[in-house]
Image: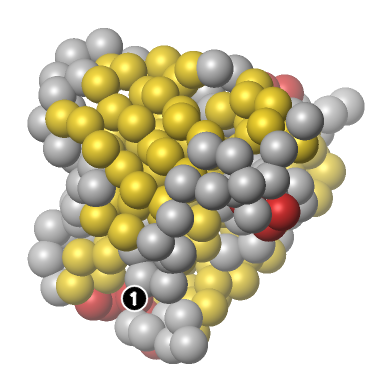
Amino acid sequence: QVQLVESGGGVVQPGRSLRLSCAASGFTISNYGMHWVRQAPGKGLEWVAVIWYDGSNKYYADSVKGRFTVSRDISKNTVYLQMNSLRAEDTAVYYCARDPTYFYDSSGFFDFWGQGTLVTVSS
Amino acid sequence: EIVLTQSPATLSLSPGERATLSCKASQSVSSYLAWYQQKPGQAPRLLIYDASNRATGIPARFSGSGSGTDFTLTIRSLEPEDFAVYYCQQRSNWPPLTFGGGTKVEIK
């Protein structure tokens, strides 16, 4: 069955970096687009980034553009979110989520989600 | 960026009652709207995609309707496990993908 497991969250000081991982099982990430979505404590959902099924396209929310980078390792079936120059407003639970479209451009919604990993940016 | 406005913010209902949740878009999103359910401490779960298509395994008491700028999620008869927060999300014009602010369905 499809499973997504995020890791790498923690407490980090403003201006520092952190890399999140999303290990996928039950499917191959080279066949599906993968997204990152975050949720600040007590707040709603915010889309962060997507990497296309073939890695050809990556898109970001304006709030993270230039600071965050999405990547993947096909051999490990894992997607990453490299977060640099972290700010207090980046504090959130970060979810990875699968785009449902198989072997084509991402549809832009999410059929499976991981359990999330909490990132706290604080001095 | 397309802004989605959900109403009401909170809906207080009893089990067995009908829930009607609204999502309005700042511009037409055609039928490219999804609904998610989120329970405390859990990840969101896809309920409805493309306005009216139930996701795999979603009970028939959940239905979605609408197109353009006005959408509705209806829960025909609330079960105890349906009390949660519901989000709408558009994929018509992206990036960015955007979500509504959520509607909390609570037990009256």
Q: Count up the numbered dots.
A: 1
Q: Nearer the viewer, residue B19 or A37?
A: B19
Q: Is residue A48 left or right of residue A5?
A: left
- Indicate the quadrant containing the C terminus of chain B: top left, top right, bottom left or bottom right: top right
Q: Residue drawn at (62%, 47%), measured in percent from left and top?
A: B16
Residue lying at the far front in this picture: please name it.
B16
* Residue A14 picture location, percent across and down: 74, 27
Q: Nearer the viewer, residue A58 or B61?
A: B61
Q: Is residue B42 left or right of residue A85?
A: right
Q: Residue drawn at (35%, 48%), measured in percent from left and top?
A: B63
What secondary structure is marked by label 1?
helix
The quarter holding residue B26 reads top left
Q: Is residue B64 left or right of residue A5?
A: left
Circle 1 crowding by C-alpha within 10 Å: few under 14, some 14–19, many from 20: many
Q: Residue drawn at (13%, 58%), measured in percent from left and top?
A: A105
Q: Residue drawn at (54%, 17%), measured in percent from left and top?
A: B8
* Residue A103 picture location, percent across and down: 15, 73
Q: Is residue B11 left or right of residue A65?
A: right
* Residue A119 picture location, percent across and down: 73, 44
Q: Nearer the viewer, residue A62 or B30?
A: B30
Q: Is residue B70 visible?
A: yes
B22 lies above or below A53: above
- Subunit bearing disc 1: A
The quarter holding residue B32 reads top left
- Indicate the quadrant containing the N terminus of chain B: top left, top right, bottom left or bottom right: top left
Q: Is residue A51 visible?
A: no
**Residue labelled with disc 1:** A29
Q: Amino acid at mark 1?
A: Ile
* Residue B79 picture location, percent across and down: 64, 54
Residue lying at the far right in this picture: please name it.
A123
